[in-house]
Image (tube, grey):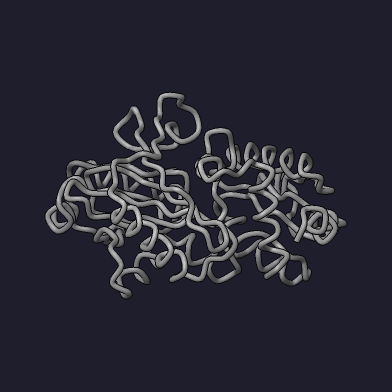
Amino acid sequence: MEAQQWIEKAGRVAVLYGGRSAEREVSLNSGAAVLTALQRAGFDAFGIDLGGQGQNPLRQLEALEFDSAFIILHGRGGEDGTLQGALQLLDKPYTGSGVGASALAMDKWRTKLVWTQLGLPTPPMQMLNADTDWQALMEQLGAPVVIKPVHEGSSVGLVIAHTAAEAEQAYRQACELDSMVMAEKYIKGREFTVAVLEQQVLPPIWLQPAVSFYDYHAKYISNETRYHFDAGLTEQQNADLKALVWQAYQSIGCQGWGRVDLMQDESGQFWLLEVNTAPGMTDHSLVPMAAREAGMSMEQLVTRILASALTR
């Protein structure tokens, strides 16, 4: 279908961003970038801060006049299936994965349970609670361990703990963000991220932060993080990585677009970490970067994402 036909089919496009999650600021920036790109591509698009400034997101949606939605809220309330369910009730096409896949991907623990059941490589993990034996945890998973809230993104609340005392402290801090907190075996090596657009797995990116790991600051603020498309992978390793990403993405029912994060250990083995179903689209973001490497402009990228929603 030609670009003009997509523009007509999309009608009035609501770009939904902002929200109330810990990733609100990133979402505001992503939303501005997506809105600008859609308008440059010729779409009749407008933006709305959904749930911002004390607003009720459901009432906001009901009051809007729109034909399709581009979801670029990150985290809970936008990426966890709730917004997707509301849009389905309103019978409005929307970008990204459906209710079930969005909810599952937002839950790192249950996503990893699915991958483990399927035999896909993901680091060993343990759910934490106030009665956790912290020394036993360090012995079982091996120090250091990664402590993370189950339902947060953008590395919010993530801590690498080297001792039992550090793990307990990190758990208590993470509990302020989420009622579910997990520990994961730390994989020493290189971090990769791989975007998926419809049926296409985009070029993998090797992330090289200036700090110990790719945290919130490295993702959205620092200009010292380095991004490599030439990661020294063999042709077979690159093909295996893309195949693993596609299998992980499909296994939880994702659609439209998304991004899979992985680690490669010192032996070359890849380990799945998580899936993002509404990834960042800021000037520091990885999906636009991978799309450019694949020969796509930002305008072409947002058009394809929106088109995938209109053909579902």
Identified at 36% across, 32% down, the residue is 209
Does residue 295 appear in the picture of this structure? yes
Q: Residue 10, position in %: x, y?
A: 80, 58
Residue 44 spot, x, y in % from top left: 84, 48
The furthest residue to the bottom: 117
x and y percentages locating residue 33 in the rendered image: 67, 38
User: Quadrant of the image for the N terminus?
Assistant: bottom right
Classify residue 93 as left or right of residue 243.
right
Q: Quadrant of residue 214?
A: top left
In percent of the image, x 63 and y 36: which residue is there?
Answer: 29
Where in the figure is residue 92, as x and y percent of width and height?
77, 66
Direction from residue 9 to residue 138 in the image, left or right: left
For the point 77% across and 39% down, the residue is: 40
Q: Residue at x 70, y 56 (%)?
A: 306
Closer to the camera, 54 or 143? Answer: 143
Q: Nearer the viewer, residue 101 or 54?
A: 101
- Residue 251, placed above or below residue 56: below
Up/down of 197 relative to 17, above or below:
below
Viewer-nearest residue: 142 or 9: 9
Residue found farthest to the left: 139
Q: Is 14 positioned to the left or the right of 264 in the image?
A: right
